């Protein structure tokens, strides 16, 4: 068996592995966005009007921060009464 085809196949398969996308470190986290309403409002407007020029990751984080601010931590202070209403 010739070692050159096996070596070429090994190199080709190694080169075809998935490459890791570069991480964008300048994108604020969801918690940072949720704690800064002015920045969140500005970024929401930019995502609405100029989404193709912004990254999808940023706009997804903006949407998640907006949802987090709207719903809060998920604990609902309202508890309905045990008996059903009488009409």
Image: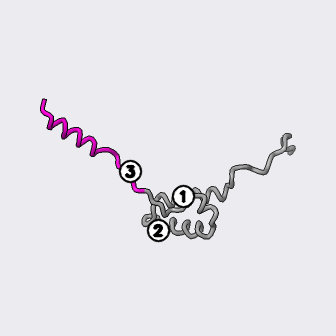
Give the percent coordinates (x, y) of residue 72.
68, 55
Q: Nearer the viewer, residue 82 or 13?
A: 13
Specify which label sits upstream in the sequence, 2 or 1: 2
Q: Residue at x 62, y 70 (%)?
A: 38
Q: Is mark 3 on a helix, strand or loop?
A: loop
Residue stretch in magenta: 1-22
Locate the C terminus and report the quarter of the image it occupies: top right
CA separation in Å, label 1 and label 3: 20 Å
Q: Is mark 2 on a helix, strand or loop?
A: helix
Name the outermost residue toward the front.
Answer: 3
Q: Which residue is drawn at 58% across and 69% down?
A: 39
Q: Which of 4 and 79 is in front in this view?
A: 4
Q: Name the residue under label 1.
A: 61
Instruction: Say whether marks 3 and 2 touch (CB < 8 Å).
Output: no
Give the percent coordinates (x, y) of residue 69.
65, 59
Give the percent coordinates (x, y) of residue 86.
87, 43
Dot label at residue 50: 2
Specify which label sits upstream in the sequence, 3 or 2: 3
Q: Mark 3 points at which residue?
A: 20
CA separation in Å, label 2 and label 1: 15 Å
Q: Nearer the viewer, residue 29 or 76?
A: 29
Q: In this rendering, which labeled residue sits more in front, label 1 or label 3?
A: 3
């Amino acid at each position: 068996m010739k070692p050159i085809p096996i070596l070429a196949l090994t190199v080709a398969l190694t080169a075809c592995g998935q490459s890791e996308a570069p991480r964008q470190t300048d994108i604020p986290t969801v918690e940072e966005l949720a704690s800064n309403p002015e920045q969140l409002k500005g970024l929401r407007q930019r995502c609405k009007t100029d989404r193709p020029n912004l990254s999808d990751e940023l706009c997804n984080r903006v949407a998640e921060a907006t949802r987090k601010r709207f719903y809060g931590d998920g604990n609902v202070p309202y508890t309905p009464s045990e008996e059903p209403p009488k009409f």
